[in-house]
Image (tube, rainbow, N blue to C red):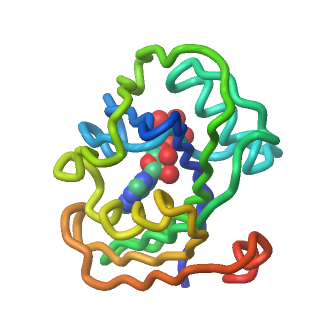
Amino acid sequence: MYVRKVYTLVFLREDSRLLLGLKKRGFGINKWNGFGGKLEPEETVIDAAARELKEECCINAKASDLKHIGNLEFTFEGESTLMDVKVFTSKIFNGEPQETDEMRPRWFNIDALPFEEMWPDDRIWFPYMLNSKLFFAQFHYKGFDSILKYNIVELHSVQDLYKNH
Ligand SMILES: CNc1ncnc2c1ncn2[C@@H]1O[C@H](COP(=O)(O)OP(=O)(O)OP(=O)(O)O)[C@@H](O)[C@H]1O
């Protein structure tokens, strides 16, 4: 049995650009990703998503402007933790992204995303996000570079995001 740990992951969209941050330390170091992390005790997922966005790139977005668009589950060969990642997007936010101790933000055109410097799973589920399809995906990794198996499905309503487990 796996021990499930919840994480948030937020992507800001502006016209045909997506905001990514280069992770400067810890899990996923040197990869471009959205902004997010673990929940604090007693915190809701959506509040954690807004807090991490603020802490990691100094952008204020209201929790109610974050759209829950998908769930990702990651397991790693030989590890008992299941990372349960709740993915959000928003087009409504305030401020200019700033570099922090954790992330170096940069806008990328959606046609020129740096997939070679991102998690391998991103190539598989980003098309759902970029085409506004809700999704649920599971990835089983060996180490951090190779996906041994995965499964991805399109969901048809936001409620389905809460039915997978
Ligand atoms: C395996 N494939 C993956 N593909 C895409 N994204 C992934 C990911 N695995 C983890 N993520 C995200 O990476 C962040 C880690 O967060 P992480 O730095 O550990 O959290 P947090 O900031 O709370 O930690 P510290 O305070 O630094 O300990 C968090 O957004 C999480 O959703």
Residue furthest to the front in view is 15
Q: Nearer the viewer, residue 129 or 161?
A: 129
The N terminus - image quarter: bottom right
**Left or right placement of residue 128 versus residue 156 in this view:** left
Q: Nearer the viewer, residue 87 or 67?
A: 67
Position of 127 relative to 37 (above/below): below
User: Which x, y percent locates residue 131?
Assistant: 49, 63
The C terminus - image quarter: bottom right
Position of 26 relative to 86 (above/below): above
For image coordinates 30% across by 73% down, the residue present is: 141
**Left or right placement of residue 2 versus residue 67 in this view:** left
Q: Quadrant of residue 94?
A: top right
User: Which x, y percent locates residue 15?
Assistant: 50, 36
For image coordinates 42% across by 85% down, the residue present is: 151
Q: Nearer the viewer, residue 84 or 88?
A: 88
Position of 115 relative to 36 (above/below): below
For image coordinates 59% across by 61% down, the residue present is: 5
User: Which x, y percent locates residue 120?
Assistant: 26, 62
User: Which x, y percent locates residue 26?
Assistant: 36, 38
Q: Quadrant of residue 3?
A: bottom right
**Left or right placement of residue 112 versus residue 2 in this view:** left
Instruction: Count how many numbered circles sit on residues in the image.
Output: 0
